């Protein structure tokens, strides 16, 4: 199955227009056409033209930006759809599908019936398709790309002989060389002695030829279905009590966790969608501190969210989806009952449902002499404790934004006022000079160097003062224990 | 740790306690130094960074610490209750900015009992709750004798549901990680270093 205009067909399905349409992609500073619709092709435009040239040929051309990632997703969706014909479906290049229909054709009334059905359904979906059917993958590819058709069973050469050599999945350079030698069709190539060909082009060409003619085998590797982490429960009668909804959630969780267990994965973000009788739906999102797949631990975490849902006339469908899934290898359990570490993770998840998971933080050491940057703050759910913590010099227990005090000179003041208190210096230790990190722009360090002093006052407070010699001033930045 | 002259310290387990005064953070630091399990420090987000983990190294390993930043006192108290009830941490420290109602204080006590966790509220001066087990006031003192990194404080016990009041001068020994009780001068002479 070859979709010659996959990208433009997809774009036109989303926004249909009459008239020529081209999809462009910026490649090495030039806007180049990557896909055209049939009308634009008929007007003489070609893939690879620059956008400006194309518009000169055809002033009413409409261009849209191409989206290769979206096309790949679309092709993957088509692949899933194509499993309706047979279970073995693989992706061929960026714009084709390969189906192994051995033993499946009779279900659609033979090969011809299956091809008609494919054509009819894809045409209804607005997709251009070229179909090729053959004994081997190579033959089908050649037929799909160069004049559709069905290869004669047992003797593909009869059908393939008139097709151009480009149908053998060769590189452009090889195709050009072959054409220069006068070997224009597959029939010509097959009639040529093999030894000189192998000497001239290497084994690759002959392998492709053999694959097309069915002399060499080639496999179709079907894409594995990605695991789907969502389960749902439809109820015959609407429910409204929190306990009932929790019971339903419990059933779904058991199924979902079973599936996660199979894949050795754990859910990080879960979403419970409750569809109400009036077609409205409510969502309860649960973000976990650690990937989990233990229903007994996840269920209580849903309680708070479910209790807050307005049930209206009742809920008749529950859907539970694991939005974010992370690998979670099986661990050997150490003892019976919940472990303390597990309880801490559950606590973080539960607090997270109330105040947000990012507001539960931990400190990580950072490599900097600047007091404010001596540590990092990271969300506890997405980090692990790091260490060791080493304070080379005594550091204050509390740190705040520098508060200016009225003092002069490089020595700590004998008396000063801070936060409305009159303080007398009893002992001052210092200075400890800290230079700003010149490689980082920091507004707080505009004043340049700082000379830090530990000042003990008669009144008791032990403060961390600093003097900025380059820009005279005194500030209080911290309080010692 | 040398034995504290009053059974009120170390703080009674499964209860919530209160501390006020300028050295309240240091008091909390000393409480954190006991035990090796995780610690939860709950504050309101407007307070900014506040606690300096490098300063805390003198008392406890910052790896044990988890900070919770709630948006207001209601969230702080709800988080505290949840944390006390879960029983997953050694100590829950709460920084409060408004007085606690009797109901709220009582709820915290019940949660602490249910979860077998100790709680400590850092309260502003004179905003204590009646439900608390003990209330301490911690004042830093100037220490003329010790070296420059002294942490001499006066701890006064101003409320105690199951015991007597009192006031003690204490000093945190960084090297030995223990609390030395310094007897007021002239009352009970003790050779230096014998407090362990």
Image (cartoon, rainbow, N blue to C red):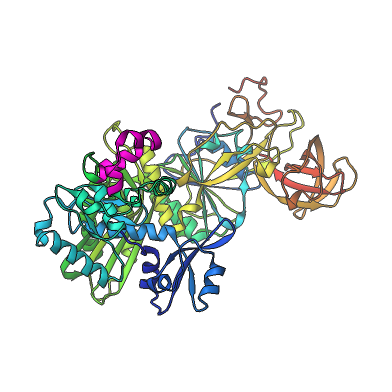
Q: Is residue A473 above or below residue B56?
A: below
The quarter holding residue A39 reads bottom left
Residue A200 at x, y percent in the picture: 40, 36
Q: Which residue is found at the position 62% from the left and 53% from the top?
A: B48
Residue B25 visible here:
yes
Name, please, the residue furthest toward the front. Answer: A182
Q: Which residue occupies the foreground of this view, B73 or B142?
A: B73
Q: Is residue B1 left or right of residue A176?
A: right
Q: Which residue occupies the foreground of this view, A406 or B170?
A: A406
Q: Is residue A234 magenta?
A: no
Residue B84 visible here:
no
Numbered marks: total: 0
Residue B167 at x, y percent in the picture: 61, 39
Quarter of the N terminus of chain A within the rendering: bottom left
Q: Which residue occupies the foreground of this view, B14 or A278?
A: A278
The quarter holding residue A244 reads bottom left
Residue A134 at x, y percent in the picture: 20, 52
Residue A97 at x, y percent in the picture: 28, 55
Q: Is residue A145 above or below residue A122?
A: above
Q: Is residue A200 magenta?
A: yes
- Write down the region rendered in magenta: A187-212
Q: Is residue B196 above or below residue A118?
A: above
What kind of secondary structure does the magenta stretch mostly adopt?
helix
């Amino acid at each position: 199955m070859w979709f010659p205009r996959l990208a433009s067909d997809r774009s036109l399905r989303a926004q249909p227009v009459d008239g020529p349409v081209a999809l462009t992609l910026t490649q090495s500073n030039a806007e180049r056409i990557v896909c055209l619709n049939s009308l634009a092709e008929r007007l003489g435009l070609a893939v690879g033209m620059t956008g400006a040239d194309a518009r000169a040929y055809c002033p009413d051309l409409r261009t849209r930006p191409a989206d290769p990632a979206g096309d790949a997703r679309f092709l993957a969706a088509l692949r899933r759809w194509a499993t309706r014909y047979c279970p073995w479906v693989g992706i061929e290049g960026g714009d084709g599908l390969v189906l192994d229909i051995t033993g499946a054709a009779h279900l659609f009334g033979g090969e011809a019936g299956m091809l008609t059905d494919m054509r009819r359904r894809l045409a209804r979906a607005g997709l251009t398709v070229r179909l090729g059917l053959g004994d081997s993958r190579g033959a089908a590819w050649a037929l799909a790309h160069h004049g559709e058709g069905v290869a004669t069973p047992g003797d593909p050469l009869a059908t393939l002989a008139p097709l151009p050599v480009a149908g053998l999945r060769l590189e452009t350079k090889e195709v050009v060389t072959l054409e220069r030698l006068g070997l224009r069709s597959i029939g010509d190539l097959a009639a040529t002695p093999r030894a000189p060909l192998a000497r001239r082009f290497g084994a690759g060409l002959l392998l492709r030829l053999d694959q097309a003619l069915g002399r060499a085998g080639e496999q179709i590797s079907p894409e594995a279905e990605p695991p789907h982490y969502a389960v749902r429960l439809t109820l015959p009668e609407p429910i409204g009590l929190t306990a009932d909804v929790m019971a339903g959630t419990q059933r779904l969780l058991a199924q979902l966790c079973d599936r996660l267990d199979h894949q050795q994965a754990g859910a990080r973000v879960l979403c419970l969608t409750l569809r109400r009788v009036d077609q409205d739906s409510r969502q309860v999102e649960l973000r976990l501190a650690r990937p989990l797949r233990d229903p007994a631990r996840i269920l209580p975490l849903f309680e708070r969210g479910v209790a807050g849902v307005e049930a209206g006339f009742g809920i008749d469908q529950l859907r539970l989806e694991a939005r974010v899934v992370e690998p979670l290898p099986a661990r050997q359990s150490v003892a019976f009952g919940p472990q303390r570490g597990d309880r801490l993770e559950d606590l973080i998840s539960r607090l997270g449902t109330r105040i947000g998971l990012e507001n539960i933080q931990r400190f990580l050491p950072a490599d900097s002499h600047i007091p404010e940057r001596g540590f990092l703050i990271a969300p506890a759910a997405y980090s692990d404790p790091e260490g060791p913590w080493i304070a080379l010099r005594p550091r204050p227990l509390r740190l705040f934004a520098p508060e200016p005090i009225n003092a002069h000179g490089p020595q700590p003041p004998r008396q000063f006022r801070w936060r409305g208190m009159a303080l007398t210096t009893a002992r001052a230790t210092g200075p400890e000079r800290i230079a700003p990190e010149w490689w980082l722009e920091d507004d707080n360090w505009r004043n340049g160097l700082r000379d830090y002093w530990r000042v003990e006052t008669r009144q008791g407070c032990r403060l961390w003062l600093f003097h900025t010699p380059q820009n005279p001033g005194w500030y209080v930045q911290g309080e010692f224990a | 740790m040398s034995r504290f002259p009053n059974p009120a310290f170390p703080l009674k387990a499964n209860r919530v306690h209160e501390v006020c005064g300028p050295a309240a953070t240091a008091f909390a630091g000393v409480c954190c130094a006991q035990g090796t399990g995780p610690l939860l420090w709950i504050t309101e987000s407007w307070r900014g960074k506040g606690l300096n983990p490098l300063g805390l190294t003198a008392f406890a390993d910052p790896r044990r610490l988890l900070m919770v930043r709630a948006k207001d006192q209601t969230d702080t108290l709800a988080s505290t209750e949840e944390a006390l009830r879960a029983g997953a941490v050694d100590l829950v420290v709460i920084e409060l900015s408004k007085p606690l109602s009797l109901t709220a204080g009582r709820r915290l006590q019940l949660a602490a009992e249910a979860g077998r966790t100790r709680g400590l509220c850092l309260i502003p001066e004179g905003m204590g709750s009646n439900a608390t087990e003990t209330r301490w006031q911690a004042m830093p003192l100037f220490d003329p004798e010790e070296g420059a990194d002294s942490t001499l404080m006066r701890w006064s016990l101003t409320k105690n549901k199951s015991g007597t009041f009192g006031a003690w001068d204490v000093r945190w020994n960084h090297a030995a990680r223990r609390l030395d009780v310094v007897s007021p001068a002239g009352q009970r002479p003790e050779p230096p270093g014998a407090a362990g």
